[in-house]
Image: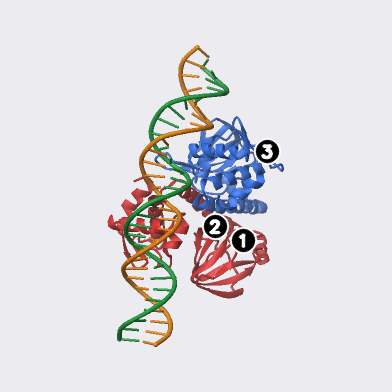
Chain colours: A red, B blue, C orange, D green
DNA sequence: CGCACGGTTGAGAAGGCTCAAGGCGCGTGG
DNA sequence: CCACGCGCCTTGAGCCTTCTCAACCGTGCG
């Protein structure tokens, strides 16, 4: 998930958050926007009973939340650790009002997000666990760079993958084992290497 | 789902489509934008084997697709029938470049959509069929107007509801029967009346 | 009047979840 | 330097929700 590349002032307040620290909480007033300088964060919504759905991930350069809003629409939590510059919401609004490009840039970024969301709706609503995981692996592989065989970000735990795909860690684990047995991927520690992107892509489109 | 309220020129080409006619197809070049004048449309994505996920619905005043893009990110199909004015994509772009408010309006609308999408991810990824249907009924009820006991739009078939919620028509039908038995709703023909919004809301938040 | 279509209901299957046990790697402290 | 403990991952057994397949019903339309 990639967010607005706005001309954010770099003189904002810099803050760091350590692993698992929640620095943005769903439904609280959105007084600050956070520009990620380094590290990564999970973005998620959760239900009162603890069920959690990961909306996306934020990396260097992303801005949270990606768009103007009165209350944060989701929570954000540091992955291994994250450094952000905090920008007061009024500054963001002022940027939008004055800089002609800023608004267009935000719109551009919002559209990109929307397109991704649409695909994820289809995934969560209609695809099997096997298809979802294959799609996720392909997506991660291509995100990391041009070379498709790159490993999936080792900062992601099984629980993260599960929360992103709307599954349980057990199901993810079992499916990874299956994929491994089928020689589609290899595993070393947390990192997952894609061995056969073509067959993985075939899984996404056709139900087994 | 509500879309951009742009100052669309009204002199565009007017077209009508009849029930079930698909007037916008996913992944084809986006040469036109469609401004809905009357009637309604389903917006959906589908998998090669026919599984379909409804992304949202479009009504009078909505613009499809809601944002600039090179190819349509989803398909659109008339519900009972729909009247639209077709606006060539370049005109939309020109609007964004010249009218300062247009871009901001689109951004505003895109953000609104994004917030809704986030909630739907949580719904599709983590909520049970019972919770989804309750959430849907509440959402529809409030959409129709101030009065919460308004019926759900009778233009929606069981299949539409199922495709929107990521369920099957059978499951929707069974759950509606259950809700009816529990005196949460009443049914007459296709229309669904909400009898007990409070208990429905309670279902959404707490799992059974 | 009969047919087609959408909705309802039932029986059975299955995919994914829950609960539970066990393994592995890593950090910590003796 | 090694032993221990903790967190994460894996694997198994059984269950539950939801899907699939199928029959039946009502309604509207030709």
Q: Using the image, tell me which numbered label, if any, was put on residue A72.
A: 1
**Residue position for label 3:** B150
Q: Residue furthest right?
A: B146
Q: Using the image, tell me which numbered label, if any, was put on residue B108.
A: none
Rendering coords of residue B28 (x, y %): 46, 42
Badge 2: residue crowd in 10 Å (few <14, some 14–19, many ≥20)? many
Rendering coords of residue B205 (x, y %): 59, 52
Rendering coords of residue A183 (x, y %): 28, 57
As measured in the structure, the alpha-carbon distance from the residue carrying label 2 to the one carrying label 1 is 18 Å
- Chain bearing tag 1 is A
Against A19, residue A66 (above or below) is: above
Q: Which SS class for mark 3?
A: loop
Front: mark 3 or 1: 3
Query: Is the residue under label 3 in contact with that under label 2 (CB below 8 Å)?
Result: no
Asked if one can make out residue B14 in the rendered structure from this viewpoint, the answer is no
Q: Using the image, tell me which numbered label, if any, was put on residue A109.
A: 2
- Chain bearing tag 2 is A
Residue occupying image coordinates x 51% and y 53%: B126
Residue occupying image coordinates x 68% and y 65%: A90
As measured in the structure, the alpha-carbon distance from the residue carrying label 2 to the one carrying label 3 is 37 Å
Q: Nearer the viewer, residue A51 or B177?
A: B177
Q: Nearer the viewer, residue C20 or B82?
A: C20
Indicate the quadrant containing the N terminus of chain B: top left, top right, bottom left or bottom right: top right
Against C26, residue B1 (above or below) is: above
Q: Earlier in the sequence, mark 2 or mark 1?
A: 1
Q: Nearer the viewer, residue A82 or A66?
A: A82
A82 vs A144, left or right, is: right
Badge 3: residue crowd in 10 Å (few <14, some 14–19, many ≥20)? some
Labels 3 and 1 in the same subunit: no
- Across the whole image, how many numbered discs are drawn on residues? 3
Labels 2 and 1 in the same subunit: yes
């Amino acid at each position: 998930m990639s967010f607005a590349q706005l001309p954010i002032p770099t003189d904002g307040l810099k803050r760091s958050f350590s692993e698992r620290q929640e620095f943005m909480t769903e439904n609280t007033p959105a007084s600050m926007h956070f520009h990620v300088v380094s590290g990564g964060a999970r973005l998620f919504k959760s239900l009162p009973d603890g069920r959690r759905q990961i909306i996306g991930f934020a990396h260097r350069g992303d801005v949270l939340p990606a768009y103007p809003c009165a209350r944060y629409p989701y929570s954000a939590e540091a992955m291994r650790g994250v450094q952000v510059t905090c920008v007061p919401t009024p500054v963001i609004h002022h940027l939008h009002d004055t800089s002609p490009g800023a608004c267009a840039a935000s719109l551009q970024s919002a559209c990109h997000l929307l397109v991704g969301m649409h695909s994820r709706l289809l995934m969560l609503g209609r695809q099997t666990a096997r298809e979802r995981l294959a799609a996720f692996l392909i997506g991660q592989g291509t995100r990391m760079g041009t070379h498709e065989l790159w490993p999936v970000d080792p900062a992601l735990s099984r629980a993260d993958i599960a929360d992103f795909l709307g599954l349980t860690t057990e199901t993810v684990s079992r499916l990874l084992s299956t994929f491994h047995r089928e020689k589609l991927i290899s595993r070393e520690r947390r990192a997952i290497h894609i061995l056969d992107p073509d067959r993985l892509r075939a899984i996404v489109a056709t139900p087994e």
